[in-house]
Image: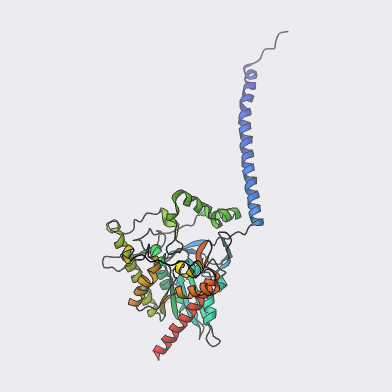
Amino acid sequence: MTEPHRTHGEAAQPAAMTSARPRRAVTLAAAALVLGIGAAALLVEVGVRLFCRVTDIPFFFWDPLLGPRRAPQQSGRYVYGQGHIDARYRFNNQGWNHPSAYATRKQPGLTRVCMIGDSYVEALQVDVGRAMFSVAADAMSRPERPSEWLAFGCSGWGTSQEYEVIRHYALEYSPDAVILLFVQNDPYDCSPYLAPQEPFAPVYLLDESDRLELLFAEPYTPSRFRRWSSMSAAVRYFVVQKDMIGRINRLRHGTHTVRGVGGAPRREQIAGLENRRVPGLDALSLPQREQRTWLLVERLLEAARDECRRRGAVFAVAFRGFAARIEAPLTGETITVPPREADPWCLHERASEMGPEQVAPICDRLAIPYLDLTDALTEMVRTTRRSHVFPDDGHYSPAAHAAAGRALAAWVDSLLTTRVADRR
């Protein structure tokens, strides 16, 4: 029997069908893979939401006067690390973590104090009602003389931004006193002579006459991708709360890039920046840079003092205290201080002496009241046998906030009482 004649198209059809099958198989495999990944991600997302304590993320906005800071009207839960930190925050109508809204109008008879600082004053690690400024307000209040403490704190700030918030914001509230909390990382967080500074925040330099010179902040746009991805509980849990990316970077690059100074946390964002904003920086030796850093800090504190005086407020500086010395009643550690020549500016091996050897003398020269919180916190540790920091974080614990708040209240009360007596 003779086979029927086939046309060219009929002969080509089986070959075309054969070649289409692998493509279809690849497409189906890719679709299955995508669906599998999506299903796994959804399962992880649901599991994290159901079974884990997950942090919220308070977003930033760009303030042209201060650089990035927290946006107003945000409240939520801040969880970090192994769960020792689990606190409620509330960023008020002005974007500051505080139980109450701020109003510039001051009630008659009210004592108002503004507290300025970095993440210690922002105080995300404790419930906002237990932060040191809340404790101080309660401790200072009397039936005949109520007290109000307003907090102006933001993570990553140094003395430059703290000075800017004093002159642009805090003094608008007509405070009786302005307290700046100085932390061991502040020189690094404000001095372009020591570390690169973010271009989207205000930076101060010293000009040829050693006067302050302001470099204005460049515009900053928050990442839309980060904001979108932060809607995921899994992203917040693993990336933010458990610091997964930071742990990977520490394994790759070593811990030296993220260590704190004197037990205080450092900004990690500066690790990849290059400092191109200081003329002649390369010609300065490290000791010269360190010397100019403290001169810059002194000029900033002097300017803050003068701004406060012009507006009728007392300006004072409180020092965070050295962590290892405060913890000594618990750890039994003996603090051995290297000789002065090893670190004359107290920025490295002798960071334990930063308060008494650098900050206190500056305040003494400028006639700025000064309080070192080391004694109050050490006494708290000794009597309660509780640490002043969290096990996996260098910020103040609730007990430390309480002790610091009481010490600050007594100190500021005495400053204002002395001021009233001097006016008589």
Check the image and tell me how it is coloured. Answer: rainbow
Between 131 and 264, the residue placed more toward the observer is 264
Visible in this render: residue 315? yes
Visible in this render: residue 102? no
Quadrant in which the C terminus appears: bottom left
Give the side of residue 114 with respect to residue 297, left or right: right
Residue 5's x, y, as percent? 67, 12
Give the side of residue 387 with respect to residue 334, left or right: right
Furthest toward the top, the residue is: 1
Query: For residue 341, which quarter of the picture?
Result: bottom left
The residue drawn where x is 65% and y is 46% is: 39
The residue drawn where x is 35% and y is 69% is: 297
Residue 260's x, y, as percent? 44, 61
The residue drawn where x is 35% and y is 79% is: 367
Quadrant in which the N terminus appears: top right
Query: For residue 52, which quarter of the picture?
Result: bottom right
Residue 57's x, y, as percent? 55, 60
